[in-house]
């Protein structure tokens, strides 16, 4: 591959990394063509961009990206699929779901950058799947804020019913 081609690929990978808030580095090697098609379709349906990239080119893109991503360099060995998403836990849930459904147990998590933190190793998959997205957290906060208000309203309604029953 020519140097210009490599440079163009590095720039494309860097642009993709900058377009998404979170990314996962996974090993999807050994999947059949049908399985690969299925995982690509699942990624598309969940707004996850899946890119197969050479480790050296990904490392160079990470070196150009703002911030220190050296913690991820040790995971850049063997076949690498890059999963990019704006929802932090979506790729983890997809990896869990998809790897359970096949005999190979692939894809497997190598590393992830989620919510400005690094997660290295397949043992981090459950932790990543449990991380709540921004929208999920907002929903939880709204529910918590509404709960006391509902109690007050229900108490007032009960009191009103008592007073109307006395009349």
Image (tube, rainbow, N blue to C red):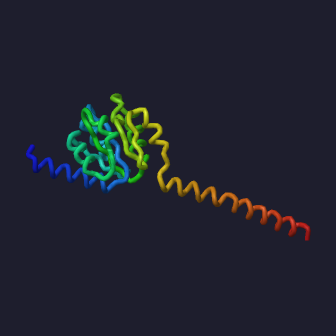
Asked whether residue 45 is in view, the answer is no
**Residue 10 in picture, x, y percent from top left:** 20, 49
Farthest residue to the top: give it: 103
Q: Residue at x 31, y 47 (%)?
A: 41
Compared to residue 12, the image places residue 76 above or below, namely above
Q: Residue at x 53, y 54 (%)?
A: 137
**Residue 76 in picture, x, y percent from top left:** 27, 36
Farthest residue to the right: give it: 166
Comparing 17 with 67, the one in front is 67
**Residue 101 in picture, x, y percent from top left:** 39, 34
Compared to residue 82, the image places residue 18 above or below, namely below
Quadrant of the rendered image containing residue 53: top left
Comparing 35 with 88, the one in front is 88
**Residue 52 in picture, x, y percent from top left:** 24, 42
* Image quadrant containing the C terminus: bottom right
Farthest residue to the left: give it: 2
Comparing 55 with 91, the one in front is 55
Asked whether residue 113 is in view, the answer is yes
Comparing 89 with 55, the one in front is 55
Quadrant of the rendered image containing residue 146: bottom right
67 left or right of 152 in image: left
Compared to residue 77, the image places residue 42 above or below, namely below
* Image quadrant containing the N terminus: top left
């Amino acid at each position: 591959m020519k140097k210009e081609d490599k440079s163009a690929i590095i720039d494309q990978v860097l642009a993709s990394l900058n377009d998404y808030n979170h990314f996962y580095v996974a090993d999807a090697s050994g999947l059949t063509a049908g399985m690969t098609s299925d995982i690509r379709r699942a990624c598309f349906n969940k707004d996850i961009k899946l890119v197969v990239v050479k480790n050296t080119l990904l490392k160079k893109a990470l070196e150009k990206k703002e911030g220190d991503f050296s913690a991820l360099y040790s995971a850049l060995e063997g076949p690498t699929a890059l999963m990019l998403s704006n929802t932090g836990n979506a790729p983890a849930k997809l990896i869990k779901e998809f790897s359970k459904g096949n005999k190979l147990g692939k894809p497997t998590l190598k590393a992830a950058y989620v919510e400005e933190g690094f997660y290295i190793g397949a043992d981090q998959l459950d932790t990543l799947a449990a991380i709540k997205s921004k929208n999920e957290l907002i929903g939880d906060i709204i529910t918590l804020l509404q709960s006391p208000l509902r109690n007050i309203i229900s108490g007032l309604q009960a009191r009103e019913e008592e007073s109307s029953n006395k009349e």
